[in-house]
Image (tube, helix red, strand yellow):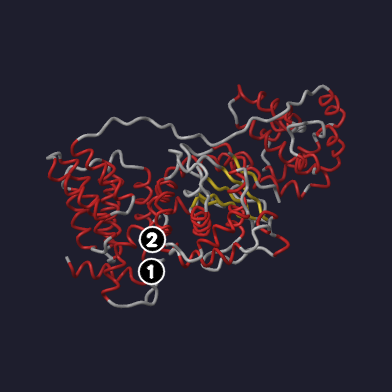
Amino acid sequence: MRPPSGLAGTGTACRRAEAVLGYTEKGKAGLSLIRGFLALFLLTTWPAPAAQQTAVEEGSLDASQKLFAVMAAINAAGYDAELQSPSNSTLRAVVRREVAAKNPACLEELRTFFAVHHRDDATAELSQYVSFALSVGDPPGFEFRYKTNELPPDVAALDGFQALLQKFYAQAGIERIWRQSQPAFEEAIARYHRPAREALLAVNAYVRTSTSPNLHARFQVYVDLLAAPNQIQTRSYKNDSFVVLTPSAELPFQDLRHAYLHFQVDPLAVRYSEELNKKKALLDFAQAAPALEDFYKADFVLLATECLIKAIESRLAPAGQRQAAVDQAFREGFILTPAFAEALPAYEKQEQSLRFYYPELVKAIDLNREDQRLAAVVFVSERPARRAKAAQVEQPAELTGARKTLEEAERHYRDRDFDQAKTAYLRVLKETGEQPLHAKAYYGLARIAANQRDPQLAEDLFEKTLTSSPDAEVQAWSHVYLGRLADAAGEREQATRHYQAALDVQGGSDAARTAAQQGLREAFNRKTQQQP
């Protein structure tokens, strides 16, 4: 187990509703219920695009309902870290308001628990709850996935939180809030998908494998929108490896790649630990490195693994930066990094994958040569802290007239104040004759109609949006939603036309393209629908 780390028409509408009923409300029947849940389903429980579910073969980029529940609970209990940061997801404030409005009966007990387990360091405070979320199963039970003696120490210290979370989940209506939050997660995941895929595929290419050395292992990346921004949390529990990313301006590419390298290399170090320990005498040199953590100084296999990963990272860097990266790692106390970096070019020239070539890398470590190299090293006193890149906040130009009204409407919509949002969208239609602004207003009204359980009106308004000169973003998403409506009715040909139309829009967002591509690959109700 690696130590955890944290850086900083009505008939048509009825048919469509009937097609969706089993998925959104298992076992319930009746047209009055059908009408109510159709719109909410379309906007909040649409299955995640395949790109969100599987970034590479053994890993996925996704959101986690159990992590969402834990983060919602601690936000309600007093977790206010970087609450005013402009880098926060707007979803964090929305969820906090939703929970406050519910005022769950267990809230005072939850606040007391949070205060008792308070950490002065905000990252450490978040870390223990991330560990808990990754150690339990799905709601509402949140049963532990590991035996009591296998639980991480910071999770064991949260004794009693499981029972509190169960009560909070039910009393605060977290299931409903989770469903309503899906569009925000879909947008964030779509934004991260391409760089995440590139990071993982770069590692696969270098180690020459598309699977883990342990066929039962799992690598999972979760996007968490309710925690303080610019955090990267990594965990390795038994055969499970996790990365949790909080909101940031861009994907922390290097940290994700580093975590995935551990996923690939850690099993090899365990398999060949006997060979590695033949070089253990070198561990004495690491004791003098002030910047090196104690757990590396106590575990030679752990230290050697980190050194190999840093050496691989240097080989993946631009040629002009490679030696500097090796030298920096060496001075920080990762004493075998130069030896591995010098051995890797030979690996690159042959055809075996890393899992088979690994023993050769270990054999290449010459104790006498490393003694001489280490005798001259000057260790640094501390390592530079790394955090995800913070969002760059630009001052927007002041909006006036209909554009200001439209921004007001969007703000009310994000806050789920649909009555105020509807009033503002309608004002936009009166205040300007500009068709693109009309299109945005109709698009907003269509989403409100869906949320307020009026699917036929939603469909009509999405169609109206498309005839009002919408910009590329609005045009693409309108086709996606119309495609989903058609799919729900079993009208696959019509749905396919809308998905293809969304892909044909020049300038549409990556999120819209991802949703449209998923729609073309498979109609949601062919696999996910369950008949009542």
Which quadrant holds the C terminus?
bottom left
Label 2 to label 1, Cα distance in Å?
9 Å
Front in this rendered view, residue 190 or 345: 190
Please name the amino acid that badge 1 sits on: Tyr
Mark 2 surroundings within 10 Å by alpha-carbon count, few (fewer than 14), some (14 through 19), many (20 or more)? some
Identify the residue at image location x=35%, y=30%: 395
Q: Which mark is residue 439?
A: none
Q: Position of residue 234 (x, y in %)?
A: 61, 46
What is the tally of numbered marks visible in this picture? 2
Asked if residue 289 is positioned above or below residue 166 in the image, the reply reads: above
Asked if residue 82 is positioned above or below residue 10 in the image, the reply reads: above
Q: Please state if 130 lies on the left or on the right of 275 as rendered.
A: left
Q: Position of residue 300 (x, y in %)?
A: 80, 41
Identify the residue at image location x=18%, y=37%: 401
- The image quadrant of residue 178 is bottom left
Asked if residue 420 is positioned above or below residue 34 in the image, the reply reads: above
Front in this rendered view, residue 217 or 332: 332
Q: Please state if 322 lies on the left or on the right of 366 as rendered.
A: left
Secondary structure of residue under mark 2: loop
Mark 1 surroundings within 10 Å by alpha-carbon count, few (fewer than 14), some (14 through 19), many (20 or more)? many
Front in this rendered view, residue 128 or 206: 128
Please say if the residues under marks 2 and 1 sit with CB atoms less than 8 Å apart.
yes
Q: Position of residue 459 (x, y in %)?
A: 22, 58
Q: Which residue is mark 1?
A: 23
Please name the amino acid that badge 2 sits on: Thr
Secondary structure of residue under mark 1: helix
Q: Please state if 508 lies on the left or on the right of 426 as rendered.
A: right
Asked if residue 302 is positioned above or below residue 322 in the image, the reply reads: below
Q: Position of residue 414 (x, y in %)?
A: 33, 49
Say whether disc 2 or disc 1 marks the residue closer to the N-terminus.
1
Q: Which mark is residue 45?
A: 2
